[in-house]
Image: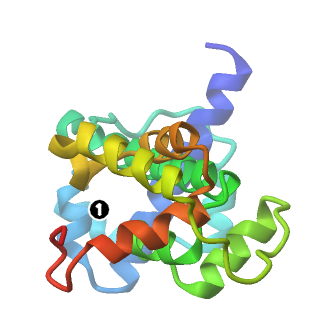
Amino acid sequence: MDRTNRTREARLNSALLRYAVECVADGDMASVRRMGFPPEMLSRLSEVRLQDLRRLETSKAIISRIEVNATALSRLLSHLDQERNREQDIRMLLQAGAPQAMMRALYGMSSSDYTAARRALGLSASSGRPREATEAEEQRLMRELARRSEQAESLSATDWIEIADRCGAPLRVLWPIIQGWRAPDGKEG
């Protein structure tokens, strides 16, 4: 075993023992028992001091066997993927000029979050109200949405950007029209 692995194991030992000592100090014996510490070790753990933990950081001993809950890890990684995709979609839409009302409707984004996200991307502040769509742009929008009617409730950021490109109008211009077609109950009117 090389020195790098021993260092990693020493850090793992230290983190594990630090956690166990904190649990014992807080009276959370159930967590320590679930980790596999035998009952006779609990009193000894209560005697471990910070300087003892520092000494253990150089130990070469392996005191634990790690077991990964693959189901829980898979759920966690899937959640991270979803969050990463959501952040990417938000960036794409903001860079494509999505208005704040659209971002609020699709992602629950507040005005301050919208402004901060645009600023973080180096985008200038939107200037005033968008122009109104031309009749031709509005007709192209209707055709595009009709073509995608089956997925209308789950359009992705890429879909919205593609719709804007096909209509020849920015999202800032198209979004108010889309909202105008929706009745208060969320259905198209």
* Quadrant for the N terminus in the image: top right
User: Is residue 46 in sight in this rendering?
Assistant: no
Image point 47% across, 66% down: which residue?
175
Q: Where is residue 18 in the image (x, y as percent from the top left)?
A: 50, 64
In the image, residue 106 sits, relative to residue 152, either above or below, namely: below
* Quarter of the image where one finds residue 75: top left
Image point 52% across, 49% down: which residue?
89
Q: Looking at this view, is 149 or 18 the one in front?
A: 149
Image point 28% across, 36% down: which residue?
68
Q: Judge left or right: residue 160 versus residue 6.
A: left
* Quarter of the image where one finds residue 40: bottom left
Q: Looking at this view, is 143 or 59 the one in front?
A: 143
* Quadrant for the C terminus in the image: bottom left
Q: Identity of the amino acid at label 1?
A: Met
Q: Position of residue 9 (x, y in %)?
A: 56, 35
Which residue is farthest top? 1
Q: Position of residue 158 (x, y in %)?
A: 48, 39
| Number of numbered tags placed on the structure image | 1
Which residue carries the number 1 mark?
41
Q: Looking at this view, is 20 or 103 the one in front?
A: 103
Q: Which class describes the residues within 10 Å of circle 1: few (<14), some (14-19), or many (20+)? A: few
Image point 33% across, 42% down: which residue?
143
**Helix, strand or loop under label 1:** helix
